[in-house]
Amino acid sequence: MGELPPPPKHEGTDEPLVYVATAPNESVANMWSGILEEHGVRCVLKGANLRAAMYHFTCNMTCQIHVLASQAERAKEILAPFLETDA
């Protein structure tokens, strides 16, 4: 019997994820995620895909956006125009 192939190399990092913004719903979070990725900033959405887990429409559930600590300032700069309020 042949040997198993070696596990794939993991190109991860030990760098922590940090919170940068909260989107008002999953649709907006996905839009912001796409904008960040267009600028080379990868992100994680926390709170996304709850619709499937909860079996009902969750259009008003917020979604947090987290990025690597080294990219947090850049992510905040990119998202700033979307986070400004008319206060």
Image (cartoon, rainbow, N blue to C red):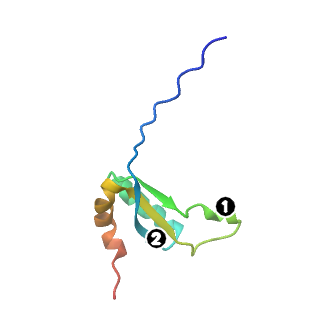
Res 58 seen here: yes
Q: In this orientation, which residue lies closer to the viewer: 9 or 54? A: 9
Residue 11 lies in quadrant: top left
Is residue 9 left or right of 83 when viewed as pictured?
right
Residue at 37 percent across and 59 percent down: it is 35
Above or below 21: residue 42: above
Above or below 39: residue 32: below
Residue at 38 percent across and 49 percent down: it is 15
Judged from this view, the residue extending furthest toward the top is 1
Above or below 32: residue 61: below
Q: Amino acid at mark 1?
A: Ala
Query: Badge 2 local density, few (<14 within 10 Å), some, or many (20+)?
Result: many
Residue at 49 percent across and 60 percent down: it is 45
Numbered badge on residue 9: none
Q: In this orientation, which residue lies closer to the viewer: 53 or 86? A: 53
Give the residue at mark 2: 23
Give me the C-alpha separation between circle 2 and circle 1: 18 Å
Res 39 seen here: no
Is residue 54 left or right of 13 when viewed as pictured?
right
Q: Amino acid at mark 2?
A: Ala
Discs 2, 1 touching: Cβ within 8 Å: no
Q: Quadrant of the N terminus?
A: top right
> Regarding mark 2 in the picture, which secondary structure is present there?
strand
Q: In this orientation, which residue lies closer to the viewer: 83 or 10? A: 10
Query: Badge 1 local density, few (<14 within 10 Å), some, or many (20+)?
Result: few
Q: Residue 4 placed where, x, y %?
A: 60, 19
Numbered badge on residue 52: 1
